[in-house]
Image (cartoon, rainbow, N blue to C red):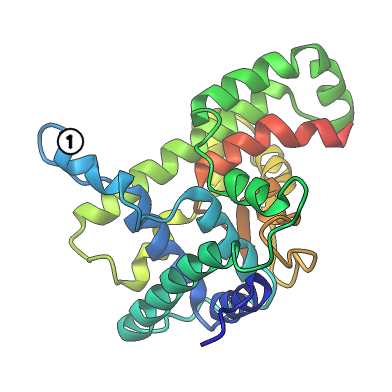
Amino acid sequence: MTKQSEAEVFSELEALCTSPGFIHVLAFLTCINNVTLYEEELGPNEIEHLYSKERLIRTEISTIAGLLLKSNIDITYPGEAELLHLAEKVNISLVTLHNSMYGGEKSTGYDNVVIKESVFYAAESAYDFQYLDMANEKYALDDSWFREVMGFSCNDLISIGKCVDSIISKQIVDYLNSGLGLYSDELLKAYHIPTDIIANETGLNELKVKSIINLFTSTENSNERFREVSEFNVYNAKPIVCKDDRYYCFTPYSLSQSIYETPFFWM
């Protein structure tokens, strides 16, 4: 059988990610690949799955989230059987995508495929809290510009980044303790970030909170330039997804990284 090209696999993956109700699959895959359950003390057995080759890494989660944005986002729950079917197909496609990067002829010069593969599957550059700490230093001299032009301070950005991470962490823990299981349509709600709660916890005006959140928010039927893993994925710059005036943040880490990287391009 002929080996699929990277473009063919990416197209198949896009078809899966634009399926009705896929946002629930995204919530499910995000949860099972990033949450560690333990009782009393955290030990090596509890975190072993985080180092499994089968675990999806953040760039893979960001890829399927980015593909979700390329079509209408249907939040209808697909049912447990379809959810698991789509999740399995996505996992298979992501493995195939990785393998397909070595499917073409080798170039005689510096191999761009090797560069792309090593960048996409590389370890993280920093912890999320480090991105926020570095953002504070990076934009310290630009704070007056933020206040005059954007209507908020650099510290406001950082406060919201920390708050979103805290809210999502708490909601995921509360959901898992609810006993509803991983296949419930309620899991999606655990990734919802209410702007009124953010305003209350940060002490910021809710209108200001929304204006900041919107700067990092993606919507459906966008991201049309995302045609392969090495191309610009708007989800990386705007990792909050808005649907029906509700905001969802599946990867708070990506938000912290974007708070560090994206404001530079506003200036």
| Coordinates of residue 98 in the picture (x, y in percent) | 53, 62
Does 162 sit above or below residue 49? above
Instruction: Please name whichever residue, 120 or 21, is drawn nearer the observer in this view of the structure.
Output: 120
Q: Is residue 260 left or right of residue 87?
A: right
| Coordinates of residue 249 in the picture (x, y in percent) | 53, 51
Instruction: Please name whichever residue, 148 or 43, is drawn nearer the observer in this view of the structure.
Output: 43
List the residue tagged with mark 1: 44
| Coordinates of residue 153 in the picture (x, y in percent) | 73, 23
Q: How many marks?
A: 1
Q: Is residue 45 left or right of residue 131?
A: left
Residue 246 makes an appearance in the image:
no
When asked about the image quadrant of residue 209, the answer is top right
Instruction: Please name whichever residue, 57 or 77, is drawn nearer the observer in this view of the structure.
Output: 57
The crowd level at tag 1 (other Cα within 10 Å; few <14, some 14-19, many 20+) is few
| Coordinates of residue 15 in the picture (x, y in percent) | 60, 81
Residue 233 makes an appearance in the image:
yes
Q: Residue at x 67, y 30 (%)?
A: 260
Quarter containing the C terminus: top right
Instruction: Please name whichever residue, 220 or 237, is drawn nearer the observer in this view of the structure.
Output: 237
Q: Is residue 157 left or right of residue 31?
A: right
- The residue sitting at the front extreme is 108
- The residue sitting at the bottom extreme is 1
Please state which amino acid type lies under the numbered disc 1. Answer: Pro
Q: Residue at x 27, y 65 (%)?
A: 182
Badge 1 element: helix
